[in-house]
Image: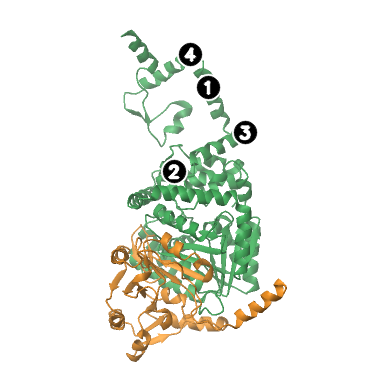
Chain colours: A green, B orange
Amino acid sequence: MTGRAHFRQLSAAAVGTAPAQAVAAGARRLVENRLKASAEFPVMELMRDRARAIRLHTLAHLDSLLEQFADAAEAVGCVVHFAEDAADANRIICDIADEHGSQSIAKSKSMVTEEIGLNAALEAGGRTVVETDLGEFIIQLADDRPSHMIAPVLHRTRFEVGALFRDELGVAFTDDPVELAAIARRYLRDIFLTADMGISGVNFGVAESGSLCLVTNEGNGRLTTTAPPIHVAVMGMERLVPTFGDLAVMLEVLARSATGQRLSVYTNIVTGPRRPSDPDGPDEVHIVIIDNGRSRVLGADTAEILACIRCGACLNICPVYRRAGGHAYGTTYSGPVGAVLNPALMGQSDWGELAHASTLCGACREVCPVCIDIPTLLIRSRSAEVASGLADRTLEATIRAYAAAAVRPAAFRALLKAGGLLGTLGRAESMTRLPFMAGGWTEKRELRAPARRTFHDRWKDRDGT
Amino acid sequence: MEREAFMARVRVAVQEAELPGASPYVAGPLVSGAGSKALVEEFAANVRVVDGECHLVATNAEVPGLIIELMARHEATDFVSWDQAAIFGEGLLATLDAAGYLRVGADVTGGQAARSSRHAELAAVPVGITGADGGLAETGSLVLAAGPGRPRMASLVTPVHIALLRACDIVPSLSHWVAAHPAAARTTANLVVVTGPSRTADIEQQLNLGVHGPGRLEVVVVPGAPGE
């Protein structure tokens, strides 16, 4: 992934638009679903603690677990590849396709393949790649970007999808979601059954057995990894759990946090290619394990973000994500997890701005199935920005001036007086326009008006009585 | 005897051993209370919660009649399935054969040409019939292990999936099943936990069944007892 964050401009342009409002409505529903699922699962909190312990243990022993995973996967007949970065991964996967003369590729939803820009690399070699998750299929047809980790077309209406299918697939217009899904099913069925390669992501790799766990609701993940003769699984290097029992714990929290389901429809566990006596399944399974910046993150003070299991709960609950929508983040990983992960993976200088796309309200930490302390990681990310001299100079000067005033009572009282003046600008409960340089802040937000009398003044009155 | 020579003899013997039913190995300790009336009822209720159907039969003898009824309900004349040995409900495939239903093969052995022609045949088959290696009461889920005579496509490619599950294989939750079958992830190339029919909510979050996998899931719980 190249480029840089433009969150200020993109979010300012997005707030209040129909796509951003659709994302917010969808996110609210997902929050409700998660709440219901947690409420009916009495051990949710205990399970989150276990899930966190499993993921942190995995990260703390990632070297030996990766060795164990690769050995176990090879022992059951997988071919394991290691990719240092995106270019390396894309080259490996294109080579696998070329070795087998694969031209027609079915793909199930995977964030890491979007991170490395795999589709473009495959298509550049003249190969056809078709996304088979309904949402990702729509995104691919529309040449759009996903707005949400697990619901990629949250920002699009069924009318738009109907028009897209009419224009791109040559079918009669319909805006009935049932009809639209049926059209996609018919179109994609041929893709699955004739593809000469299937490419998937990986939700979890199981170190002890070399198994790959893929979770989907539609069944496209199973078809992609069953029908074609070759299955290529692309996995971020941090996606392991030590044992099958640990996998069960992660599955108990994943779907509940993501969609509010108790389990997703298909929990698919692949352990090697089909065995000699199996009637079907792929003849070859390749696993491409990707670093692409992760070892640097693991060695830094934001390593905890690698515990993320990509459920999307932090997106749904985040007031910033809900106003700005997913596209404003400008890259694969949006929302609070993206605000930490993108600068960590791709560099402070281009992506550090995203660490400011948060109010630090802490809601993300409350809902995270592995209890990642995202607000603390965001503060560390901002500190790294300041330490490397990349922070906004004006902001830094303002905060230094405030800090200087706050420790000098006379100066602080003078500052409060100035604040009181602001309060007299309007009599309303909230302020919709701040003067001068602060004006940008209130363009898309309201601010509670300052009290007419300061705390210090009221404290004096109290002394008097 | 040196270790290597010792092991070489064992490896050859293992290669030549004829042990039907050895694969896939999913057995493990029995879960206390598995298959109790309460668990079976909870399982059936939760299959319905996730938009599946659940049929409880009193005796194995009822199974073929019920399956023929389901075939008729789904207007099916052909089906893809697991082998009889992996399906509970003795004589089911023979009964279906006698009644004129056609079993379509799913074996893709024989290179890309065999795979392509199998897929072309399977594309139009309306019903898949499988056994199951576990039922999870809390989620209404089925656990299916691939292996000899157990094509994965039978639970995946058809619009309707009919699964036969023994009551004694119903355990409280996924964690219970995994604890009781610790080797399962190693001993089959494909283990799948199926929770209801295929679904999507990608378009305006409106629920939609059967987008890629089966849109209808019929679970038949047969009375089988532990040790059977």
How much space separates mark 3 and mark 2, taking CA atoms?
A: 26 Å
The kind of secondary structure element at disc 2 is helix
State which tag comes first along the sequence, 4 or 3: 3
The residue singled out by tag 3 in the image is A387
Subunit that carries the residue with mark 4: A
Residue A364 is marked as: 2
At label 3, the amino acid type is Ala
Tags 1 and 3 both on a single chain: yes
Choose between A8 and A346: the one closer to the eye.
A346
Q: For the residue marked with disc 4, what is the amino acid?
A: Pro
CA gap, disc 4 and disc 3: 29 Å
Residue under numbered circle 1: A403
The span from disc 2 to disc 4 (Cα, nearest Å) is 37 Å
Q: Nearer the viewer, mark 1 or mark 2?
A: 2
For label 4, the crowd category at 10 Å Cα-Cα, with few meaning under 14, some 14 to 19 and many 20 or more, is few
Measure the C-alpha gap from mark 1 to mark 4: 12 Å
Name the residue located 37 percent from the left edge and 33 percent from the top edge: A446
Q: Which residue is mark 4?
A: A409
Going from N to C along the chain, the mark reached first, 2 or 4, is 2
Q: Residue furthest top?
A: A464
Q: Nearer the viewer, residue B156 or A169?
A: B156
In what element is the residue under mark 4? Answer: helix
Chain of residue at mark 3: A
Q: Position of residue A386 (x, y in %)?
A: 59, 33
Query: Disc 1 residue type?
Result: Ala
Three-letter amino acid code at disc 2?
Cys
Looking at the image, which residue is at 49% across and 63% down? A214
**Quadrant into which the C terminus of chain A falls:** top left
Q: Are marks 1 and 2 on the same chain?
A: yes
